[in-house]
Image (cartoon, rainbow, N blue to C red):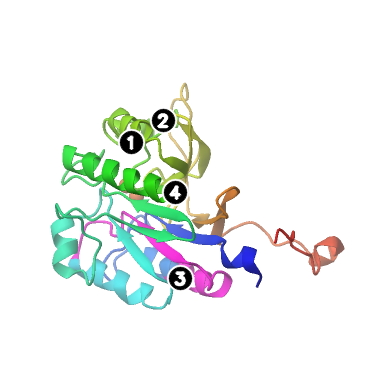
Amino acid sequence: MGTYTDNLLKLIVMSDIHLLPKGEVARGLDTAPRFVTAIQSVNTLHNDADLCVFAGDITEKSDVAAYALFDEIRAGNDSPQRVMLGNHDDRNIYLENATNPMLDENNFVEGYDDIKGHRILMLDSSEPGKLRGGLCEQRLSWTAERLAEAKALGLKIILLLHHNPCALQMPVDTYRLAAPEELLKVLHDSGADIIQIVAGHCHITTAGSWGGYPCATISGNQHSVEPFLRGRTGQQDCYAAPAQYAVIMSDGVNCAVHFQSYVNESALMNPDLFPGKADQKFEVID
Ligand SMILES: [Fe+2]
Ligand SMILES: [Fe+2]
């Protein structure tokens, strides 16, 4: 490992894990063994990750037993970990049962980690009983303060939140982050170097931008949905695969967001068809 790779951030983001108490299954998809597979995938492919973030909708219906199962399964991974909440989570139930949760001074489940020249800023967009979630005045102020600090420190920002803030031109937009323009104003006003935003919630993989900031969404551990775009009518199709997490690698200039599928129904092709893919070299940037 050279200097370059030593300074290259590797951040894992998983979302929409939707666990139920052991043995319970929703819509024919058992999310627990899928989450076990996700953890095994990180262990096998990304045991060098700097941080693994679980970006909300940890449980399907906030059962204490489901949070316990979450802790049991994620204990199989040694990376530093952070837990965020989504609309399917109940902050009080989570906090009553959590060991070492992220917590800001107002008791929201949010925080940050400064790693390799980046600030990973993780917001709590959950609001009890509200599908759209939201960020109150306290959370917006907290975000503004953390962005100002990061700017002063010269850190690149990777912003994580459960609810997708960007419109995807899909019906899910009716329950994306509430009042997204308020967060966008905080980001713009900060002048901080925000290089990537990643959200879950919408159960679909997308890339694009929001107010000028690169913004990606990830499908998660539960069902994924087809792009059901404005103008379509009828039933939107849902799929049991892929289940996937994001792998973000950033050197501060190049920030790549990969989507690693751990439940994948694509057929593996014969490697002999791709002799050029054997023993490939990576670019040397040192
Ligand atoms: Fe979800
Ligand atoms: Fe959600």
Q: Is residue 200 visible?
A: no
C-beta proximity under 8 Å, tags 4 and 1 = no
C-beta proximity under 8 Å, tags 2 and 3 = no
Q: Which mark is residue 167?
A: 2
Q: Is residue 148 visible?
A: yes
SS at mark 3 in the image: helix
Does residue 177 sit above or below 105 in this rendering? above
SS at mark 1 in the image: loop
In this orientation, which residue lies closer to the viewer: 272 or 30?
Answer: 272
Question: Can you give x and y, in whole percent of width and height, for residue 254 in the image?
Answer: 60, 49
In this orientation, which residue lies closer to the viewer: 273 or 46?
Answer: 46
SS at mark 2 in the image: loop
Q: Which residue is identified by label 1?
A: 176
Real-space CA distance between mark 2 and mark 4, rounded to the nearest whole angstrom = 30 Å
Mark 4 or 1, nearer chain start: 4
C-beta proximity under 8 Å, tags 2 and 1 = yes
Mark 2 or 3, nearer chain start: 3
Residue sitting at x 36%, y 31%:
173
Q: Which mark is residue 33?
A: none
Does residue 181 sit above or below 215 in this rendering? above
Question: Can you give x and y, in whole percent of width and height, for residue 37 in the image?
Answer: 48, 70
Q: Which residues are magenta?
A: 36-63
Foreground mark, 4 or 3, reads 4
Hey, what amino acid is under mark 1? Arg
Q: Is mark 4 within 8 Å of ligand 2?
A: no
Mark 4 or 3, nearer chain start: 3
The quadrant in which the N terminus is found is: bottom right
